[in-house]
């Protein structure tokens, strides 16, 4: 029987783990020697591989592998004892193996980004077979204890997931896919609920496919908000810049709806029963793959019969847990170096499965709780001790737990203009992957940057008279209409700090995003078969805002913001329905009036998973 474990047990656990890690550092540091070689695959293709073994190391050490398309991330540029991501593991003693996948960097073969994966075809040559061949070569040629683990963040995390999904090598004993895509169309890298992630998709696909290495598109200006605005229709990308030479972009153009192309690429569709122990890792403010770890864990949990499936969720942006110090994200202070906490947990996980150390008593989920800045252990995730409670939009820009009573007449309006879209982060908007970019932390940026604009609406509660804890999935039930025939709907649930915040006065009235996402209106009934919106017709949109673990503190307000653009992270919806937005023309882009309903019959609300022992007042003030 599963049960909730008290917080103090986890605090003790982390304290002990950190103490052990600190004691380890007092020992003579382990140093590593590097070898580089080309490892053959079953079809004769050779892949560039770096192998780090401890100097004077024992042949009883296990092997940890990371496979990657990149030149500098998760690929062993740093010796493992100097790499913040794995330095605890390195000090504990492992053999580290880093390999570039086919067609990238120094590896032979052809690169197919996120190529289709057929779990049932065990004879296919793909990332799973390449990993199998690598492991087979390692256990036959590198002295070890014969046990192998695999980990990685983002694309390397997806590669770890694939290795466990189909015919894993008998020596592969545990994997940890971290910051991994769940479904490219539904909620990660390229689309969210059908809305196209323009700047990321443009820059990432070019960066990985324009050359064998990693490259950056040659923008001729610094603030890319104007560059993407001047780009005009998405049809201009191939006409002016890519000239049909970027395969992934061509895939976007040819598959604007959810079809077999996207279904075959989605990791959530080729995972079910965990074949070996798997530790998912994700961040609540992951600006790239927030949804993936949650989605993959939930899917595999339905099939888990051996207690193999576990998850860690922290207060992080994409991969931040691999940093040397993860105490702050943007202006939000976590109150501790959560990267140290993560390293202790990761070391304990692999030590148990690859070395037999410890008792293996891992909880289902270890999740950081923002607001209170504490780690929590759960026997179920999401936590079962919650009650879905509806927070309604009301008149005068108020939020209340009391449903509106005024029939069907209550609504608020704003004008959405594709020629003046709302920026998704503070300008200037730099190249996504650049040293000066705020891409990593934009989800924690103060939303006062946009709440004064006339093309969005804000609603908020009175100051809370008690703490309100939400743990689990947040869902928006939006009733809206438009004068156009298509529309995007962005919903943000925000923690607004008090008018005067004593602990840090400069954060007074700060507007911190807790849960958010976008929905493209044409997909309201089907992501496979989109339909135009009938102008003026009130439609219901159910928008998943993902999982959270947060405490709205007493004196704070809960705020909801609604808007229809988020640029240039998401492309501009023309707002006139066209079958394929990638083929829209300039004349298709029109201004529209958006109406957000807050009436008895069309009661827009946010479903909050409030912890049952929370004493929030469920009436309007």
Image: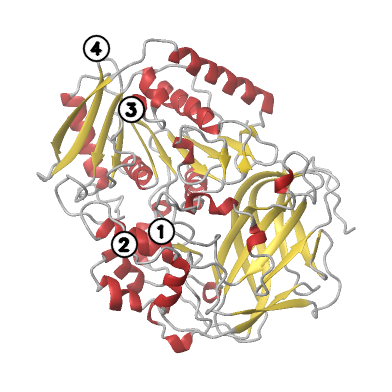
Q: At x 49% / y 74%, what residue is drawn?
A: 572
Q: Is residue 148 above or below residue 452?
A: above
**Label 2: how many Cα within 10 Å (few below 14, some 14–19, many 20+):** some
Depth check: give the residue in front, 499 or 211. Answer: 499
- Residue 214 picture location, percent across and down: 27, 52
Q: Quadrant of the N terminus?
A: top right
Q: Residue furthest front?
A: 221
Query: Label 4: which residue?
Result: 56
Callout in the foreground (4, 1): 1
Mark 1 secondary-structure assignment: loop
Left or right, 72 with reference to 42: right
**Quadrant placement of the C terminus:** bottom right
Q: CA distance from mark 2 to mark 4?
A: 45 Å
Mark 1 vs 2: CB contact within 8 A = yes
Compute the Cα span from label 4 to label 1.
45 Å
Task: Please tell me which of labels 4 and 1 falls first in the chain.
Answer: 4
**Residue annotated with mark 2:** 217
- C-alpha gap between disc 1 and disc 3: 29 Å
**Dot 3 or dot 4, earlier in sequence:** 4
Residue 322 position, x and y percent, is 44, 36
- Horizontal side, residue 368 vs residue 163: left or right: right
Considering only order in the chain, which callout, 2 or 3, is on the residue closer to the N terminus? Answer: 3
Gap between marks 3 and 4 measured at Cα:
16 Å
SS under mark 3: helix
Q: Quadrant of residue 245?
A: bottom left
Which residue is label 1 attached to?
A: 431
Q: Which mark is residue 80?
A: 3
Q: For the residue labelled by badge 2, is the local secondary structure a helix, a strand or a loop?
A: loop
Q: Residue at x 79, y 40 (%)?
A: 613
């Amino acid at each position: 029987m599963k049960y909730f474990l008290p917080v103090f047990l986890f605090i003790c656990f982390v304290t002990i783990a950190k103490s052990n890690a600190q004691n380890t550092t007092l020992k003579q540091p382990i140093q590593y020697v590097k070898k580089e070689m080309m490892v053959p695959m079953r079809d004769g293709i050779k892949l560039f591989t770096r192998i780090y073994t401890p100097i004077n190391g024992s042949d009883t050490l296990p092997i940890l592998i990371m496979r990657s398309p990149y030149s500098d991330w998760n690929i062993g540029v740093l010796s493992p004892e100097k790499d913040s991501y794995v330095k605890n593991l390195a000090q504990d003693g492992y053999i580290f193996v880093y390999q570039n996948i086919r067609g990238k960097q120094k590896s032979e073969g052809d690169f197919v980004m996120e190529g289709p994966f057929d779990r049932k075809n065990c004879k296919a040559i793909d990332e799973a077979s390449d990993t199998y061949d690598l492991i087979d070569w390692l256990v036959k040629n590198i002295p070890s204890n014969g046990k192998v683990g695999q980990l990685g963040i983002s694309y390397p995390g997806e590669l770890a997931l694939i290795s466990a999904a189909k015919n894993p090598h008998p020596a592969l004993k545990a994997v940890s896919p971290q910051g991994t895509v769940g479904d490219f169309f539904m909620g990660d890298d390229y689309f969210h609920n059908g809305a196209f992630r323009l700047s990321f998709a443009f820059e990432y696909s070019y960066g990985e496919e324009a050359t064998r290495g990693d490259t950056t598109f040659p923008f001729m200006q610094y603030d890319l908000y104007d560059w993407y605005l001047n780009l005009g229709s998405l049809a201009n990308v191939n006409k002016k810049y890519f000239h049909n030479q970027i395969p992934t972009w061509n895939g976007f153009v040819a598959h604007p709806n959810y079809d077999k192309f996207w279904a075959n690429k989605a990791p959530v569709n080729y995972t079910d029963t965990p074949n070996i122990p798997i530790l998912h890792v994700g961040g609540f403010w992951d600006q790239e793959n927030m949804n993936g770890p949650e989605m993959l864990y939930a899917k595999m949990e339905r099939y888990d019969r051996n207690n193999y499936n576990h998850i860690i969720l922290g207060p992080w942006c994409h991969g931040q847990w691999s940093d040397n110090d993860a105490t702050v994200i943007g202006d939000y202070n976590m109150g501790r170096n959560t990267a140290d906490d993560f390293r202790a947990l990761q070391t304990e996980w692999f030590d148990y499965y690859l070395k037999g150390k410890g008792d293996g008593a891992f909880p289902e989920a270890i999740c950081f709780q923002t607001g209170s800045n504490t780690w929590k252990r759960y026997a179920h995730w999401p936590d079962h001790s919650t009650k879905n409670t509806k927070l309604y939009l009301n008149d005068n820009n108020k939020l209340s737990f009391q449903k509106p009573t005024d029939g069907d007449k209550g609504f608020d309006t704003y004008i959405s203009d594709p020629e003046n879209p709302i920026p998704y982060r503070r300008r200037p908007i730099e190249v996504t992957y650049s040293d000066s970019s705020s891409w990593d932390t934009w989800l924690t940026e103060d939303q006062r940057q946009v709440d004064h604009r006339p093309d969005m609406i804000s609603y908020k509660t009175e100051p809370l008279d008690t703490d309100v804890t939400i743990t689990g999935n947040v869902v928006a039930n939006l009733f809206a209409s438009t004068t156009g025939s298509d529309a995007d709907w962005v919903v943000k649930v925000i923690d607004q700090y008090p008018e005067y915040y004593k602990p840090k006065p400069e954060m007074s009235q700060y507007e911190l995003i807790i849960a958010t996402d976008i929905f493209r209106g044409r997909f309201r009934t089907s992501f496979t078969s989109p339909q135009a919106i009938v102008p003026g017709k009130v439609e219901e949109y159910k928008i998943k805002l993902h999982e959270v673990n947060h405490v709205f503190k007493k004196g704070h307000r809960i705020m909801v913001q609604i808007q229809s653009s988020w640029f240039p992270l998401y492309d501009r919806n023309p707002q006139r329905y066209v079958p394929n937005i990638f083929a829209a023309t300039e004349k298709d882009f029109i201004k529209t009036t958006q109406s957000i309903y807050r009436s008895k019959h069309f009661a827009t609300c946010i479903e909050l998973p409030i912890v049952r022992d929370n004493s929030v007042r469920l009436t309007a003030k």
